[in-house]
Amino acid sequence: MPIAGEWFTPTGLSFNSIEARPETTWVHFSLSDANGIVGQGEITDTQVETSIAPIVARLANNLRGQKLTADTDVITLNNLTTEQLEEDLPLATAVSGLRCAIADALAQVLQLPLVDYLRELYGHEGKADRKVQLYSNINRALKPTFDGPMDRSPDGFAEMAQRAMEAGFTTAKCAPFDECRAPFSNSGLPREAEIGLDRIRAAKQLIGPDRTLLVDCHSRFDLESALALEPELREARVGWFEEPVDPITMADELRIVREKAQMTMAGAEMGYGVDLFRKLMEEDVLDVVMPDVKFCGGPVEAYLIGRELEPRWKGSVSMHCPSGPLSLLASAHATAAFDASIPLEHAVYEADWRHEVLEPFEIVKDGYLELPDGPGLGARVDPVAIAMRGKQWTE
C-alpha cells in the first residue's frame, strides 16, 4: 500500500561486515539513489549455511532504475512467491534485507521515522512510543571471544544474568543445552540435559522470583525428550519454553508438547510472512510467535504480523533479534509500531563497542532502546566502524 506520489529508484549497492566475535559477523548492505538517499538492511547469516550477499545482488539487479513505491516491489519485480520465501531461508533472508532497505529509503523520502511510516502506511492511529522495552539474551555474551573461551558453567550463566539485571533488564534469556542433540541414548530426560538444567537453576536463583528467565532450546530435542524436559523447566520457574523442536518443520510434534505442557510455548524465529505466523497460532502450535526481521520479511512484514495477531491473541508476538544493532533498530521500529506487549530481544554484551557501530550511537538504557529522531531507521552503519573492525565490498 504505497503512499501516493513518492518513490525510491536505487542505482547503487554496496556491502559491509563487522566482526563481533569469532562466531558472529554482522553483515549489512546499502541501496542508494542519485539523490543521496541510502536504505540499509542486515543480512547476518549465522543461521544460514550460505552467503546471502550474492542473492541480494542478484535480486537488486532487477530493482535498479525502477521507481519503487513499496518494499514488496522486490518480490513482484523478481517474480517471487510466498511459497518460495517460506521454503527457502537464504532467499527469505535476502528479500527481508531488501525490504528493510527499501522501507528505510521510502521513509527517508517522506521524511518520516520508520515507526511513523509503518503506521501511516496502514492507517494506524495514535503516536507510537519512542522507547522500546528490551529483554536481555545473555547467550551470545557467553560464547568465545577473540581473546579466548568464555565461561559456560552454571556460575558463568548466573554472573551474566546478574550483569543484565544490574543494567536494568527485568528478563533474561539463555540457550543452555549445548550438549544436547536428538536422538538421545536414554529414554525420558536426556542425560545430556542435566548440565543445561544446572545452568538454568543457577541463573534463576540469582535473578530471583520477581524477574523472568526464558529458555531457548534451539530445536535440540524430539517429542519424547521435550515432554520429559517441560516439567523440569516448570519446576525451575522458567518463563517460556522456546523451540524444543522446530515449530515449522515439526509442527505436529510441537502441538502435542503444547497440549501437554503447562508452560508458554514460543518460537518460529526463521519463519517468513504473515500467513505462516497466523497459521501457527490458529493451529495451536505456539502461544508466542517470534518473527525475526532478518527472515520474516523485514520491518513492514513484522509490523503486519504484530498488527494482525496481537488483537486476536494478546501477548502473542515477540520479536526475535539476537543480531547486530541495525537489525535491533529495525525490529524496534516494528515493535513500537504495532504496540507490542512483550519486550524485544537484545543480545547483550556481545561486544563492548557495539553501540559505536551506528551513527548516531545505539542508546540502550535501563532496559530500553531509544529510537533516534531521524527519518527512516534514523541511524546508519558508521563507515568509521567498518574501517576499524570490518570490510566493505561490492558484488
Image: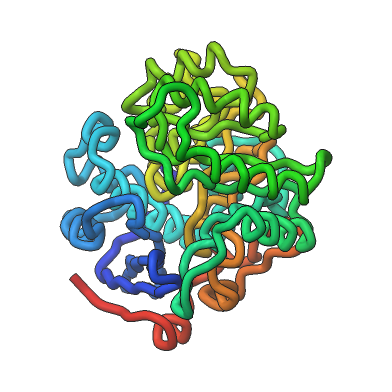
Number of numbered discs on residues: 0
Residue 260 vs residue 178: left or right? right
Q: Looking at the picture, does residue 360 appear above or below residue 88?
A: below
Residue 38 percent location from the top left of the image: 40, 69
Q: Residue at x 46, y 13 (%)?
A: 256
Q: Quadrant of the N terminus?
A: top left
Identity of the residue drawn at 66% across and 58% down = 155
**Could you say which quadrant of the image residue 163 lies in?**
bottom right
Q: Quadrant of the C terminus?
A: bottom left
Q: Position of residue 311 (x, y in %)?
A: 63, 23
Q: Nearer the viewer, residue 229 or 216?
A: 229
Relative to 313, does residue 378 appear above or below in the rendering? below
Res 30 quadrant in image: bottom left
Q: Position of residue 302 (x, y in %)?
A: 48, 40
Height in image: 380 above or below 388?
above
Question: Can residue 108 be seen here?
Answer: yes
Q: Position of residue 179 (x, y in %)?
A: 43, 46
Q: Residue at x 54, y 39 (%)?
A: 194
Q: Residue at x 60, y 66 (%)?
A: 349
Query: Does residue 236 appear to the left or right of 289 in the view shown?
Result: right
